Image (cartoon, rainbow, N blue to C red):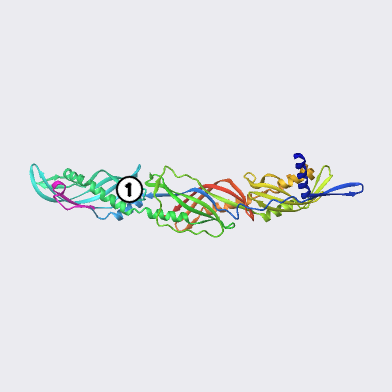
Amino acid sequence: MKQTLIILTTALIFQSCASSTTSSNGGSSTTVTQSNPEAPKESYLYKGKQVEKNVSTIGIPFEISMADVERQINASVKDLVFEDNSMEDNNYDNFMCKVYKRDNIVVTTQNEAFTFNVPLKVWAKVGYKVMGMSIPPQELNFEFNVKFGSKFSIAPNWEANVQSFPIGYDWIKKPTVRLAGFDISLAGLVERALNSKQDAILKALDDAVRKNVEIKKYIVQAWNTAMQPYLLSEKYRTWLKITPTELQMTPLTSINNKVKATIGIKAITETVTGAKPTFLPVITVPDLKLVASIPDDFQVGIMAEIPLSEATKLTGDTLIGQNFSFKDGKYNVQVTDIDIYGDNEKMVIKSGLKGNINGKIYFKGTPAYDPIKKTVYLDNFDYDLQTKNFLVGTANWLFQGVFAKNMKESMTFNIGGQIDEMKKQMQANLNKQVSKGVTLHGNVLDLTPDKVYLTPNSIICVINAKGKLDIKIDGL
């Protein structure tokens, strides 16, 4: 009983989808099947182009020339470096002095530290004993070069950290006093006195450097520079939008009397089509994270587009008017029209036929990208289920020819030229001066498929372009 119901139900389905007529021509008969299976419903998961987002790191290399350091420090360290105006402080040390910068400070690099050679002249008033005799305080004038090293680092809040340490003295004019016709050197005495003041002198120099090295304003400038939308393709109205999320920096290293490092801006990189995106400049930036190296992991999605109208025309140009024979010419059909639309993530191909089948049949496939051939094709291509059920009962001979194979091959679209052109334009637009003092240096190294999706108007193929992007900012 159950089997009988299934057979009857199947027969009713086929009857609702198709009818057959037989015509006689010179003693031979031809069966014509009317095809009208239920059409797949048109629907789309995406209504338009999607903003393609990736996580990237943009490098901002910078270097500090010691000539620039010298210029800034000499501008910030005034003539009077340090003064002690009391003979009674430091447990009545019987010493007071004023220390002046005698000439320009010279800065060199060694390993991970700066070395400063500071020419100084000193006026001092010293009370002392010579051979057991107390001598009233006398004023002395002498000159020497003080040498010290300084380890420079940047704190998480982008303030400069300076930690100086003494290296030694080079006397130019030693302090002496004339007693009983003899010049008596007081270098040892003065050195001991200066050593007691050494920490205070170095702190004064450190404070001067720290106060005048403004790093954060350059970082804010770099951040806002990175946020500017960059044109990737004028023809396809494609923009690169960068949204920074994190700041990184490599340790400072010294090479050829220059200190170098790289700031890395970790960011969301987006491909946006249409009008130039807007952005709001910032006045502050996140705290710094120190890292061993900055990765070269810049990537952006290239979107190639095939309008459905163009895909329909290309397929129609290949198939419409073609005749297909089956079972040694017993059955024949000709393609009369082609239409293409979406059913969620699948593409539907609606084909009109005339001959032994009159009416419509439907195919389905999932759009995919072939990176070797640079083509969009339909994966898992087959007759739609309703069409297949119809053909099994009424015209299964259609499965035995090359019709479906030809249909699938006609649904292959070459987008290599479009991708190559976009890559070329992107390469050019990522290697140019974008504003005064700001230059992009980019290199696209690899193209990898991401996804293919349908919109009501187009097939969109997303290709991830991976490479490296640096921003060079003059003055940083």
Judging depth in this view, the residue of 327 and 253 nearest the camera is 327
Q: Position of residue 302 (x, y in %)?
A: 57, 51
414 inside magenta stretch: no
Left or right placement of residue 88 versus residue 437 in this view: left
Judging depth in this view, the residue of 230 and 431 nearest the camera is 230
| Label 1 Cα crowd, 10 Å radius (few <14 / some 14-19 / many 20+) | some
Residue 392 visible at all: yes
Q: Position of residue 97 (x, y in %)?
A: 18, 51
Specify start and end residues of the magenta stretch as a single range.
Answer: 82-100
Residue 180 visible at all: no
Relative to 40, say whether 327 is above or below.
above
Q: What residue is pinned by disc 1?
A: 161
Q: Quadrant of residue 212?
A: bottom left
Q: Position of residue 448 (x, y in %)?
A: 58, 45
Extreme-front residue of the structure: 1
- For badge 1, the amino acid type reads Asn
Q: Position of residue 197 (x, y in %)?
A: 21, 47
Q: Say which element carries label 1.
A: strand
Left or right placement of residue 34 versus residue 206 in this view: right
Left or right placement of residue 456 versus residue 247 in this view: right
Judging depth in this view, the residue of 200 and 287 nearest the camera is 287
Q: Which residue is at 27% across, 45% downward?
A: 147
Number of numbered labels in the structure image: 1
Judging depth in this view, the residue of 342 and 206 nearest the camera is 342
Q: Quadrant of residue 11?
A: top right
Q: Quadrant of the N terminus?
A: top right
